[in-house]
Amino acid sequence: MASNIISSFKAFGEKFKVPEKGERTDALKKYFARGGVISCVKSNNAWPKLIYPSPLRIRAQAKELETILAQYEARQKDWKKKLGDAKSYHSRHQILKLKEPLYWQHKAKELSDSDYRQDSKSVSLPVHLVADPKWKPMIKMFVNNIEYRKNLSETVQNSVVYKNDKKVAKYADELQGFRSDMSEAQLKDLGKKISEMQGQIRALQMMEKWAKE
């Protein structure tokens, strides 16, 4: 039996004359590529009889990969949600703002107070983010505290930080852009891993059929 232990497709091809192409050939190549070994004996069929691994052993290997695949798919689902959240962030908050009294307080003040309206415009006040806990305190201060409003307006107009983009919430745009890029990179990587894992599982399923012959 020891002489029949084979660990490469090249060695297998030298010992047994089998089709150079086909699903079973591809499956065996994948199996060897993962470090697998087999033991065969000649039979009357085109392919030799597979002694090792047994169907039970192959099924166990497939289950291990299926567990890893499920973990990859769960991570993929999470990253898809993160990507969706990042891409829909501003549009979602355009709707959420309508439920916030502070938003309507801002709108009323914008209509009735030209000075306030000018300050709001000068900083591109992100009032549509009023439902976001990260931005609501700043917006509330801007609406209700004239000293804060004037200081913020002056900072945005004169600070080198805002030299090329006079928008107080530019960080919000940059953050969502970063989250989108990160999510897309993770999804690309996971997509490759999932595709590879699915291929390995299909190869083992083909090997299992062979082992049962």
Image (cartoon, helix red, strand yellow):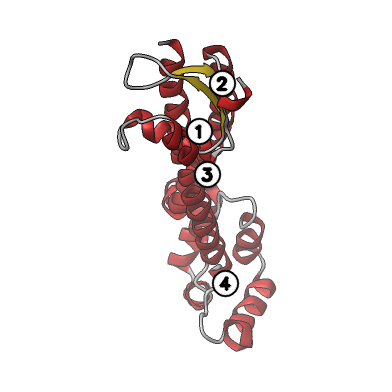
Q: Nearest to the eye among marks 2 and 1: give it.
A: 1
Q: Nearer the viewer, residue 125 or 169?
A: 169
Measured in 3D between alpha carbons, the distance from the residue under mark 2 to the one under mark 4, in whole angstroms, is: 52 Å
Q: Is residue 67 above or below residue 187?
A: above
Q: Is residue 70 above or below residue 154?
A: above
Q: Residue at x 55, y 54 (%)?
A: 130
Q: Which mark is residue 68?
A: none
Do the numbered discs 2 and 1 sit on residues whose CB atoms are within 8 Å?
A: no
Q: Amino acid at mark 4?
A: Val
In the rendered view of the protein, which quadrant contains the N terminus? top right
Q: Percent x, y for residue 64?
A: 60, 25
In the rendered view of the protein, which quadrant contains the C terminus? top left
Q: Which residue is mark 4?
A: 168
Measured in 3D between alpha carbons, the distance from the residue under mark 4 to the one under mark 3, in whole angstroms, is: 28 Å
Which sits earlier in the primary sequence, circle 2 or circle 4? 2
Q: Amino acid at mark 3?
A: Trp
Which sits earlier in the primary sequence, circle 4 or circle 3? 3
Q: Which residue is mark 1?
A: 31
Q: Nearest to the eye among marks 3 and 1: give it.
A: 1
Q: Amino acid at mark 2?
A: Lys
Q: Which residue is mark 2?
A: 63
Residue 100 shows up from this direction: yes
Q: Are there few (<14), some (14-19), or many (20+) residues within 10 Å of tag 3?
A: many
Q: Are there few (<14), some (14-19), or many (20+) residues within 10 Å of tag 2?
A: some
Measured in 3D between alpha carbons, the distance from the residue under mark 3 to the one under mark 2, in whole angstroms, is: 24 Å
Q: Which residue is mark 3?
A: 79
Q: Percent x, y for residue 52?
A: 56, 19
Task: Name the element at disc 2.
Answer: helix
